[in-house]
Amino acid sequence: MTRRTHAALAAALAATLTLGLGACKNDKSDSGGDSAAAGRTQAPGAASGTIVGGTPVKGGTLTVLSNQDFAHLDPARNWTMPNMDFGIRLLYRTLVTFKAEPGAAGSEIVPDLATDLGRSSDGGKTWTFTLKDGVKYEDGTPIKAADVKYNVERSFAADLTGGPDYAQQYLAGGENYKGPLNGEHLASIETPDDRTVVFHLKRPVAEFSYTATLPTFAPVPQSQDKGTQYDLRPFSSGPYKIETYDRGKQLVLVRNTNWDQSTDTVRKAYPDKIVVVQGLKGGQVDDRIIASEGADASAVEWANLRPESIPKVLPKPDVKSRLIAEQQGCTDMLYPNTSKAPFDDPKVREALTYAVDRDAQVTAYGGPAMADVATSYLPPALTGGTKQDTLKIAPTGDPEKAKQLLKEAGKTDLKVSLTVSSGDKTRAEALQQSLAKVGIQVTITTADPSVYYDTVGDTKNAPDLAILGWCPDYPSGATFLPMVFDGRTIKEKGNQGNVEQFRDQATSDRIDQINAMSDVGEANKAWLQLGDDLLKKAPTVPMLWQRRPLLAGTNVAGAFGHPVWTGQWDFATIGLKDPAKSQG
Amino acid sequence: MILYLGRRLLGAAGILLAICAITFTIFYLLPADPAVAACGKTCSPERVAEVKVAMGLDKPVWEQFATYVTGIFAGRDYGSGPSATHCGFPCLGYSYEYSLPVWDLLTDRLPVSVSLAIGAAVLWLLLGLGAGVTSALRKGGVTDKTLMVLSVGAASLPVYFTSIMLIWGVVRTAGLLPYPAYHNFTDNPVEWASNLLLPWVALALLYAAMYARQSRNSMIEAMAEPYIRTARAKGLPAGTVAVKHGLRAGMTPILTIFGMDLGGLLAGAVITESIFGLPGVGRLFYDALVRSDQPVILGVTLLAAAFIVAANLLVDLLYAYVDPRVRY
């Protein structure tokens, strides 16, 4: 997925900054330098894998303080990272899910509704799942295989927009299917009995067990379907059900008494009640959780800690111990427009790779508590937790090498345009400075976050450079490299993954070859290799691996950032130290 | 009077229709395609086309506009199969983001914005008119000068600055009030008022300063009229002269701007609501802008226009009451 959700956050952030600190912010050349020095001496607030607060005690009310509403909670439409985490951990179960563990272990999958990770046959083109015995919905009725089929079918419906489209890409006969709302069903999903569901795919998909972690593979009984209105109240198969949902204001979850702990190895369901308060101002949420008074002690924040709140957290050990900062698992990149001069020349793009001062990008983004320098396309979560670094360029860049490459290409004194989302203006200016050192003159244009993707995704009028990112939907190169580097995915308008318009036959062919592999381990190795090979062709420049700094109240326990869901709290295990201290 | 009212109401309807048409056209011309936004990330052009049909965006703009306008009065049916819903009068469409009728969203958020606007208006009228009249009656004196310097200061503070300072000072540092959250007036009037106090003050300070300067000027003008001299000569007490003869005549221009200000605020104070985290119409509007939720943006625009038109009409009718010379 793209960083669209990040764009929304950035919009809110930009608003605060322009409102609150307008003058200081624009004056960044000086103040930026100061915070850079401060940033380097401070270590990140928390390393990957930190658990805040020990093991929780059952009971109490956990509060989530949020600046926004959920985009979608309907499992057929839920495809923004933190929202997927929330839905899957609390409201609905999927065939397969991720372990509730911090660090690399969190990327491992375990059966959830199914008894195993799925059995493939026909060379990886047919996948069979068997449902566990005794799994029930909130009204006590059993979860049936047909309900899983039904929700996968729903993801094809044109009015149920926004959800993952893997089912549409993978399932045989999906091209002409329009969803079940008018009574038609998809023949390539079979349910021979109430506990067995069989998926027939167009091509072998080695990592289909991972695909089955998506909310598309959560059950929705046809009798409960209300089409677009289902978004307001998904029918629960998870440990909680919706009591009230006042959109944009408040969501209250209470226990689903028909959820049976013995059928679920992942979810712990510690709190009795979970209240999400929405529409709060981001900075105020930070302040409230830092202070942790009254009910706020039993609260966590939904959206990232603001960069401006970091100085209030890091110097205080008691507050810092409540901070997590898991890597989001997305790679933030500089996208040159490879369809036209000067970046149609691989030499010039290579020069760009050497010219970018990624250290300055980290600083401009808020320092090491907020991001790490990226050294490859695939983030560490996709490379087995270790950092790939084949080019070994210094984090501050190598201007000499860049100049030499530009000379070899015969292109000196370049003038290029860069369009960024208004929240990324500081970063654009840092980029402008580092490229100026090698003789590339950059003109910055900012676009409102709400139209940014449309602006840079309009292939005819796209700028020379853009800053965007890509987040894999599950830990597999298959949800990253094809979306960003396969020339066949380019769309004339609304182009979202391959924004750099990179058309390379060899890459497309290789993607097809890897997609056809039936062994997951082999495919993963091949993706890694492809990532490294691509780096030499420099279609984009990896810049940052952003972290998700989140703060918990003093009474919160079992809290850590899940590596798969962009470092959001794992809601499967979060709870309270002392339930009596929370307010119902 | 009735004829005048009829004419004005007809005019108001015309203005609203025009605003509706203009907003509609602007959305149609914008590069952002709601179908693409709704569809999601790796959406194919064929799928976008299907989504367009499902959202009714494949029709020509005039047809969409006609459906929208008739929908307001006659209601509309949305979706098919299990999605089918009826959006009854007054149907302002369905929010892309919330899957709820825009009208329901507006009426749900309106109490917050109305509470904010009315409370702030009472405060700023008291403060502004009080300061203005006092200044005018003591023209040139120390009180006048102090009040006017203060009002220049207050008027030059942007509302986001005062809001942030109030939160910083009163809530964060002194801890006198909680972070504002909206409580229904009917549930708990004390909580309602104490939570809204800061936003009221933030808004009122700005407006009060402007009203103080306005009312001082019109009051001074009114007090220089020959009929004031006559009233004084007849031996009326100074208070009666100032209030009954001076203030009443000086009120007319104040009433005009008050109508506009209150009308605009009723449909949401975007900045104030956002900073204080109040779930009002302004906040709804801001969220809709960020997420390109066009039906909501259109709905709020219409609501704001309706309030301003209505407030203007009301003010014009009040003229006749305040100023005996005005007759319709």
Image (cartoon, rainbow, N blue to C red):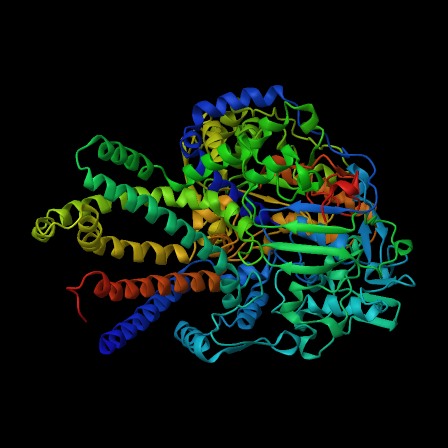
Which residue is nearer to you in this view: A551 or B107?
B107
Give residue A271's position: percent from left, percent from top. Answer: 78, 48
Please give the name of the residue rendered at 42% of the width and 40% of the height, measured from the top-left corner: B160
Q: Quadrant of residue A231?
A: bottom right
Please give the name of the residue rendered at 19% of the width and 45% of the height, measured from the top-left corner: B217
Is B282 on the left or on the right of B222, as rendered?
A: right
The relative height of residue A556 versus residue B34 in the rendered view (above or below) is: above
Which residue is nearer to you in this view: A177 or A23?
A23
Which residue is nearer to you in this view: A44 or A21?
A21
Please give the name of the residue rendered at 39% of the width and 66% of the height, measured from the top-left corner: B24
Q: Quadrant of residue B14?
A: bottom left
Visible residue check, residue A329? no
Give residue B85's position: percent from left, percent from top. Answer: 59, 76
Is A554 on the left or on the right of B128, as rendered?
A: right
Is B208 on the left or on the right of A503, as rendered?
A: left
Give residue A40's position: percent from left, percent from top. Answer: 60, 21
Which residue is nearer to you in this view: A497 or B15?
B15
